[in-house]
Amino acid sequence: MAIGIKAWAGLAAAIGGIALVGGALVMGDQHAKPALMAPKPVAVASITPKPKPTDTAFTIKRILPINGPIKYGAWHWDEAGVPPGPLVITVDLDARVLSVFRAGYEIATTAVLLGTQEKPTPLGVFPITMKDADHVSSTYDAPMPYTMRLTEDGVSVHGTKVENGYASHGCIGVPTPFAQKLFAITKLGDKVTITRGKMVGLGDSLAGT
């Protein structure tokens, strides 16, 4: 049985409801409360934390190709093609090796003399606080050419004769020609990181080591 539009409207008015007429809503009771509807969805942007930028100036990009352990008195230096950048010096007490990185490229490395159990070489990160090309130790009355001081009590990187069986009073002794070259490129505030057995490789960061 067909029901006309007016009949639908009348039915809606009689029951206080809503009739759908031709795709349009017709309220039967103008005083009736509107039908409950689902809340309108609100778009919420997904916040993804941005990864911390990597400071590529401190990312290791090259290790010098050296076969086998470095012998006492031996050293290597190759800065050809290496761009300018921050200088980082690392010392591994277990390997007894000092390495020099610039802009993440290892440019130099050498075997070193270290302190004894009575006068150990300290662990930590130390800025170069004093440079003296012709320094003489006032405590031991010994020449310390190309001294780069690290601690208040005099622990330094300096030139010396690096031979097996010798040790320092806590300083980091490097071959004098190597010390001369290192002295020429360092500045006050450059960091020397002294660790024991910490291994780093390509892609690792030197920052905060």
Image (cartoon, rainbow, N blue to C red):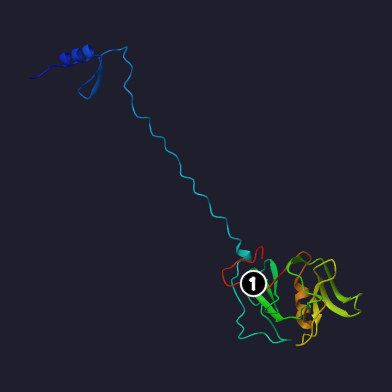
- The quadrant of the rendering that contains the C terminus is bottom right
Determine crowd level at label 1: few under 14, some 14-19, many 20+ residues with C-alpha closer than 10 A: few
**Where residue 12 sits in the image (x, y, percent)?**
22, 15
**Where residue 21 sits in the image (x, y, percent)?**
20, 21
Above/below status of 151 relative to 77: above
* Residue at which label 1 appears: 198
- The quadrant of the rendering that contains the N terminus is top left
Name the side, left or right, on which 69 lies relative to 161.
Answer: left
> Which image quadrant is residue 78 in?
bottom right
Residue type, mark 1 in image: Lys
- Whether residue 190 is visible here, answered yes or no, is no
> Which image quadrant is residue 11 in?
top left
**Which residue is found at the position 35% from the left and 29% from the top?**
38
**Where residue 58 sits in the image (x, y, percent)?**
63, 65
Furthest residue toward left:
1
Above/below status of 158 relative to 129: below
Above/below status of 27 relative to 102: above
**Which residue is found at the position 33% from the left and 19% from the top?**
34
**Which residue is found at the position 77% from the left and 83% from the top?**
177
> Which image quadrant is residue 105 in?
bottom right
**Where residue 149 sits in the image (x, y, percent)?**
82, 70
Q: Nearer the viewer, residue 197 or 86?
A: 197
